[in-house]
Image (cartoon, rainbow, N blue to C red):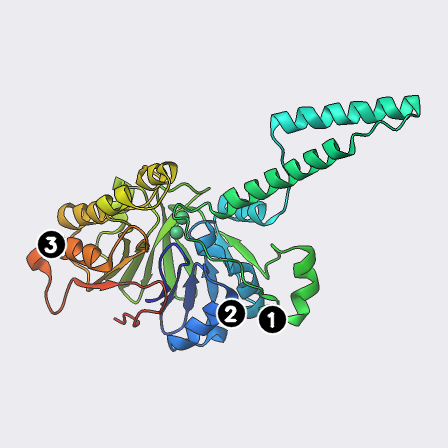
Amino acid sequence: MTVLASGSKGNSAVIASSRTRILVDAGLSCRELLRRLTQAGEDPEQMSAILVTHEHQDHVAGLAVLARRLRIPVFFTESTHRAWVRMLTPRTTMTYAQWLDKLAIEREAKAAETAKVPVYDVSRMEAIASLSAEAATLDAGLNRSGDLDAELPMEEAEESCEPAESRTVAKADPTYLPAVEYFHSGTKFTIGDIDVCPFTIPHDAADPCGFVFCSAGIRMAIATDLGYMPPNVTSALRDVDVLLLESNHDLEMLKDGPYPWSVKQRVLSRVGHLSNLAAAEFLEREYDGGAHTIILGHLSESNNAPELARISAERAIGDRMTLLGNRILLAEQQIPLQPVEL
Ligand SMILES: [Zn+2]
Ligand SMILES: [Zn+2]
């Protein structure tokens, strides 16, 4: 497992056997993902597939361009794929009040047409047009900042990453992918020689999943972006050798931090993100102690400090930490982590 990036500004990791290389999430620009793959000693051309946990921007920012560039299939659940397509498809929406205004304007226009007297209220039309535009922007903004930490990357101009042969089709349809494969949470499937077991995680997305990967008897798991640890997750994480586990925020820092109250509530909710405390409670009470390495990930830059996350997990692991087991690493937002090889 190589974590290329982890945190609310972008997530991506490589799970590789000797024959198969799966990119889990593509939450940075295509350009940046290519750069990090190379930095981590991976050849982008050797990637077999991209697997998506959920449709939040910090997990899919570079997805379409990268998949087209590498000409590899993308694995989603059907609901996640649909939500992602919706997110990238521009639409205009208006509030009920704006809709009533629009009806009134249309009525006036019709009346003017019949009376052949131009009574268009230009300034009012303009005001309504700008309101609708504002509503559309707001809506797009809401879609884009679907994830809970409002620390999302700005979209980069990615044209130069877009391969020439797909440039035209991508312009007409930004959701175009070379191939799409659907999986179902709870049903094992295979990519090359890696078995993938997706499990449902509680998070505010269409159909969010964590994964256990198994190849040659070695099991690696990814469980980030979850509001709490339900029994299906704790049992999926039994008997894993490498675990990427969310340790998103320190409760005190979140409470006193810069987020608006509503966002704090969402982060803390049952479909938000796992706190240092919740991760520690899992490690102390339910974790079987059998992993070689535990990587703490999706740390919030505003509401956590790496040392707090580490100390909290180390305390929970206690004397189960040895030279051969339960090593704790911290995934980073800005640079790839050393590959964990077993
Ligand atoms: Zn996320
Ligand atoms: Zn998310």
SS of the residue at dot 3?
A: helix
For marks 1 and 2, the one nearer the N-term is: 2
Residue pointed to by mark 2: 31
Residue 133 position (above or below residue 99) = below
SS of the residue at dot 1?
A: helix
Pointers 1 and 2 in contact (C-beta within 8 Å): yes
Residue 161 position (above or below residue 180) = below
Identify which amino acid the numbered label 3 is placed on: Arg
Residue 260 position (above or below residue 120) = below
Instruction: Locate residue 101, reporting x and y percent.
Output: 69, 26
Query: Is residue 9 at all visible to an observer of this figure?
Result: yes
Instruction: Locate residue 16, reporting x and y percent.
Output: 37, 69
Identify which amino acid the numbered label 2 is placed on: Arg
**For residue 241, side relative to residue 213 (left or right):** left
Q: Which mark is residue 160?
A: 1
Residue pointed to by mark 3: 315
**Real-space CA distance between mark 3 and mark 2, rounded to the nearest whole angstrom:** 39 Å
Pointers 3 and 2 in contact (C-beta within 8 Å): no
Badge 3: residue crowd in 10 Å (few <14, some 14–19, many ≥20): some
Instruction: Locate residue 39, reporting x and y percent.
Output: 40, 76
Identify which amino acid the numbered label 1 is placed on: Ser
**Real-space CA distance between mark 1 and mark 2, rounded to the nearest whole angstrom:** 9 Å
Residue appearing at x 17%, y 55% in the figure: 313
Nearest the eye: 250 or 270: 250
Residue appearing at x 69%, y 33% in the figure: 128
